[in-house]
Amino acid sequence: MKGLIPERTKKNSLLREWSGPLTKDLVLNPGGFGLGKVPGRLQPTNTVNSVCGFCATGCSLKVHLKDGEGVNLSANPSYPVNLGMACPKGWEALRVLDAPDRATVPLLKGESGKLQPVSWDVAASTFAKKFKEIQSKHGADSLAWLGTGQITNEEFGYLGALGKFGMGIRHGDGNTRQCMATAIAAYKQSFGFDAPPYSYQDFEDSDVLIFVGANPCIAHPIMWQRVMRNPHNPEIIVVDPRRTETANAATQHCAIAPKSDLSLFYGIARELIERGHVDRDFVEQHTERFEDFESFVQDYTLEKVSNESGLSRSEIGSLVDSIAAGKRVSIWWTMGVNQSYEGVRLAQSLINICLMTGNIGRPGTGANSITGQCNAMGSRLFSNTSSLVGGHDFLDDDHREKVAGLLKIDVSKIPNENCWAYDQIVQGVENGTIKGLWIIATNSAHSWIGQSRFRDAVKNLEFLVVQDMYHSTETAQLADLVLPAAGWGEKEGTFVNSERRIGRTRKVRKAPGQALSDFNIFRLLANYWGCGEMFKEWETPETVFKLLTKLTKGRPCDISGIDGYDLIDEKCGIQWPYRSEEEDGETHRSLFSDGVFFHGNGRATFLFDHPKPLPEPVCSDYPFVLLTGRGTSAQWHTQTRTSKSDVLRKLYPKEAYVEVNSYDAEVLGVSSGGDVVIRSRRGEVTAKAFVTPTVQVGQLFMPMHYAETNYLTKPDFDPYSRQPSYKHCAVALQLADLSASV
């Protein structure tokens, strides 16, 4: 009772604390379930395994349940992906669900111009009314959606079918266009299908690993841990302008000039040919157009490539020697390759080297694109954007008939043409063709290249709908209607990870307020649109999953042998294809072990073009090259979720920063921690300087996680993939208190 213990006694007591956590909260008790000891408040009554919802590594997390609700988690030691490991984002996956800025009710912009709470009935009615009016008034091209790589396969299937077959929305794309479109196009053209060929076991089986434009130490830390488990003392080679964390750990770092890599890999191919390191039997039996490629690369002499890349002839020679000596060579790439104005041909230059040396289809080999988001792979297969659902082709009459039959819809509902890509949708908004836009689980107003242009474009819309976990994102703040969505941990479904492994994600929390899973939002909107009958059998996520497995039958991604969620749990995830246990039952499987590819003739194709000039070279007004990429392992994309964790926020700088070489810093009078202005032809931003030798002279680096970065980037796009070129633009740097660039 208050007042019984004198204040002096409290202050002088050495035996008892009178503030802070209670003893019962500090004492550790046996947790059960193989968890060791845990505080009493976190002692679980059960556990369940769920695949993480951040990156495409696809780690399994053991969620600790107390009375049916997730209260804590740990890494699943028995899952073949992460083997009991997790990165900082995974450890904090539950915490970001508790943020105070969660979207908990639908919000509709009123006459005051401010978003106001409304009922789901009003929100869904308004969605249908506004979009139908736009469609009726402006025609078939007037509506579009922009999706994500973060929702489940079942939700992708529902969104794609509802949008295109139910609502008649002609154009839809996802933010996977920003990260994986180049790899998709490269694989389709070279192999005949979008098919990353590897399993994570290849990290441990290779004797030479080459990382091009990839920094797995921080971008995919669990994959990097798999590299560290490699027992073969492998050669680890990093090709990257920056001395990244991965480059620091490598046995060779090739610090190339930005965007000289296409020329470099053509030169490497030429040297391999000259030195007799071509697997002629493999090339003759399993590929086509090698003779054309062999002739093409003759122009890429060591002297030419050395001059263009900035690497010495001996550095290039060492890289060639490593490839030639390796018995199991694997090449890995991420955004440094994909986010380029000539990314498809660059990715194919890596594929060509693997093909010509026979480093594909065997353990520890492959031309391997590492995927970014937790379900970018699912988006590629099921979202009805870059391909017809289930790995089919909108342009193929037989494919449309097959899909229509399985979905029990009229084939006329399925478009017979491909839709616009992300940049073309933005352009359509900009020029007034698109009047209604639906954005699902992505933050375009932060992440899209040349951000000011996107923000200006959406002002032309008659109606903007944003469906998201948080009402505070830059994009949600621009919306006319916000639909509150559940996040990871608040819904059931499946993801496909970077090695093609389908894993299950579980509902371990109730979504806050009136927020619904994306699956249930799509169901609701289907009914209000008037096409609910088309989806009457789409009752639960598992029901839809079983339908998706049927759609894949006969395609390279065939998973028709998976009869439901229980088998996925039983096998700790399943890589596609999975036609049956007899055919595809192994835990780790790489593709093309039989040398048969997915083109009609069963061969892989050598593809190549000469490098194109830089879209924006440096000049006297803009003398620096700006590079962008991931900042730390604690940050994710636009920080929509990671910024909600107290722990993660302590692991990275709060304010935007720019890395500056020490020589340039000395010339400009820049010091670490000082404010600088970075200016491009698109705009200017202020950031903190970080002086470091990890960037070369004349180069700057800014993490993509800060909104400031994409005010500077230049909207250039690969002609085959339509992927934006985030990795290179010309900028100027000055001290913040100067009025003119130095």
Image: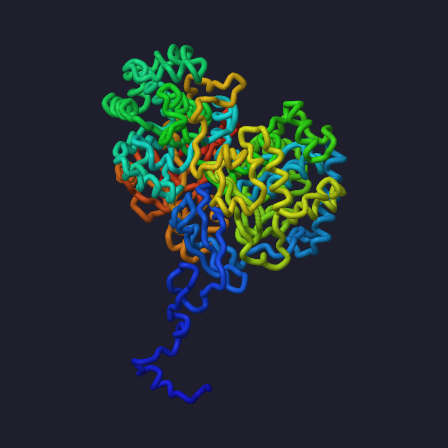
Q: Total label count?
A: 0
**Coordinates of residue 55 in the picture (x, y in percent):** 46, 43
Q: Answer left or right for 537 relative to 281.
A: right
Whether residue 618 is visible: no
**Coordinates of residue 570 in the picture (x, y in percent):** 50, 47
Q: Nearer the viewer, residue 322 or 12?
A: 322
Residue under the image location 70 percent in, 46 percent down: 525
Q: Answer left or right for 193 relative to 39.
A: right
Q: Nearer the viewer, residue 41 or 247?
A: 41
- 394 shown above or below 113: above
Q: Quadrant of residue 26?
A: bottom left
- 69 shown above or below 567: below
The residue most toward the bottom is: 4
**Coordinates of residue 246 in the picture (x, y in percent):** 32, 39
Q: Answer left or right for 41 relative to 510.
A: left
Residue under the image location 38 percent in, 28 percent down: 362
**Coordinates of residue 341 in the picture (x, y in percent):** 46, 26
Whether residue 356 is visible: yes
Residue under the image location 35 percent in, 12 percent down: 299
Q: Answer left or right for 659 relative to 432.
A: left
Name the quarter where the C terminus is drawn: top left
Q: Nearer the viewer, residue 132 or 236?
A: 236
Residue under the image location 40 percent in, 72 percent down: 21
